Image (tube, grey):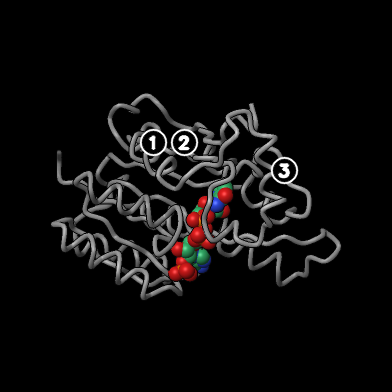
Amino acid sequence: MKNLTAVVTGASRGIGRCIAKTFAENGYNVVINYSKSEQNAIELKKELNENGFNCEIFKADVGNYEEANALIDFCIEKYGKVDVLVNNAGISQIKLFTDITPEDWNCMLHTNLTGVFNCTQCAIKEMVRNHSGNIINVSSIWGQTGASCEVHYSAVKAGVIGMTKALAKEMGLSGIRVNCIAPGVIMTDMMKDFSNEELDAIKEEIPLNQFGTPQDIADLALFIASDKAKNITGQVIASNGGMVI
Ligand code: NAP
C-alpha cells in the first residue's frame, strides 16, 4: 500500500474510533481527533502503536476554525499530506421542536455542519495542491428522511448531504472525491438514552432486523477511500439494514 494518511474527526469514541482503528490496521497513518475524551484517545493510540500501526492524537473542537486548521496542519507536519478526511465528529439531541433553544440550534450547527466546513476547507487546499484526496462525511439516515424530535439534528445532517453533493461537483476536476455515509441505527454512546423497548420497536421497522455496528461504517469508509471506489463521488451511501430504501 502507498504511504497514505487519514484524519478522522471525533475518533475518541464510537464510529470514529472504529474508523480510525480500521484505517490504521489497513496501513494508513492516522490522526485521531478528539475533543473531550482525551483518555480514550490516548488508549487507542497506545493500542495501535503497540500493534505496530502509525497514529497520533490531536485535540480540537472541529467547530472552531483555528482548531480545525491546527488539526490539519498537524497532520501535514507529521505525515506530509492528508489523503483522506473523515468528517465524523457529531453530537445529537432529542427535543421537541418547540423546546429547542437558540443555544441548542447553534451547538448542533457548530459541531455537525460548521465542523465539516472547517475541516474540509483546511484539508482541501492541500488536496488541491496534490491533485488527489478523499473527503468522507458522516451524515445520518435522519438527514435523508427527517426525524421527529430531532429537527435541528436532521437539518444539519441534511446540510452535510447538500455540501457533499455540491463539493463533489466543484472538486472533481481537482482529483478529489467527496462522498457521504448515511448510517441508520448504530449501537454507540449516541444511542444510550433509548430504552430496550424503544430499541425493540425501532428494530421491528428494519427489514434486516438488526442494528449496525461501528465496524459496518468503518468498512464502508475504507472502501470509499480506496481505488475500488475511484468512480464514486457525490454519493450518499446508506448503511441502515434497509430501514430506508
Ligand atoms: P458518539 O459515540 O457519541 O461519538 C461522538 C464522537 O464525536 C466522539 O469521539 C466525540 O469526541 C466527538 N465529538 C463531539 N463533538 C466534537 C467536537 N466539537 N469536536 C471534535 N470531536 C467531537 O457518536 P457516534 O454514534 O459514534 O456518531 C459518530 C457520527 O455518526 C456522528 O456524526 C453521528 O451524527 C453519526 N451517526 C450516528 C448514528 C448512530 O446511530 N450512532 C446514526 C447516524 C449517524 P469527544 O468525546 O472527545 O468529545
User: Split into 4 quadrants, where in the image is the C terminus?
Assistant: top right
Residue 232 to residue 199: above or below: above
Q: In the depicted view, which residue is nearer to us: 163 or 137?
A: 137
Give the labeled residue for mark 1: 177
Query: Within the image, what quadrant is residue 57 found in?
Result: bottom left
The first of marks 3 and 1 along the sequence is 1
Residue at the disc numbered 2: 168
Q: Nearer the viewer, residue 205 or 86?
A: 205
Question: Pointer 2 and pointer 1: residues touching (CB < 8 Å)?
Answer: yes
Spatial separation of the CA atoms under disc 3 and disc 1: 37 Å
Q: Is residue 163 above or below residue 208?
A: below
Q: Residue at x 19, y 46 (%)?
A: 27
Q: Counting other residues with Cα less than 10 Å from the Cα at mark 2, is it few (<14), some (14-19), or many (20 or more)?
A: many
**SS for tag 1?**
strand
Image quarter where the N terminus lies is: top left
What residue is drawn where x is 24% and y is 60%?
76
Q: Which residue type carries mark 3?
A: Ala
Cα separation between marks 2 and 1:
6 Å
Badge 2 or badge 1: first in the primary sequence: 2
Q: Which residue is mark 3?
A: 201
Residue 117 visible at all: no
Which label lies toward us, 3 or 1?
A: 3
Q: Is residue 3 above or below residue 92?
A: above
Residues at badges 2 and 3 in contact (C-beta under 8 Å)?
no
Residue at disc 2, secondary structure: helix
Amino acid carrying label 1: it is Arg
The residue sitting at 55% across, 41% down in the picture is 211
Disc 3 secondary structure class: helix
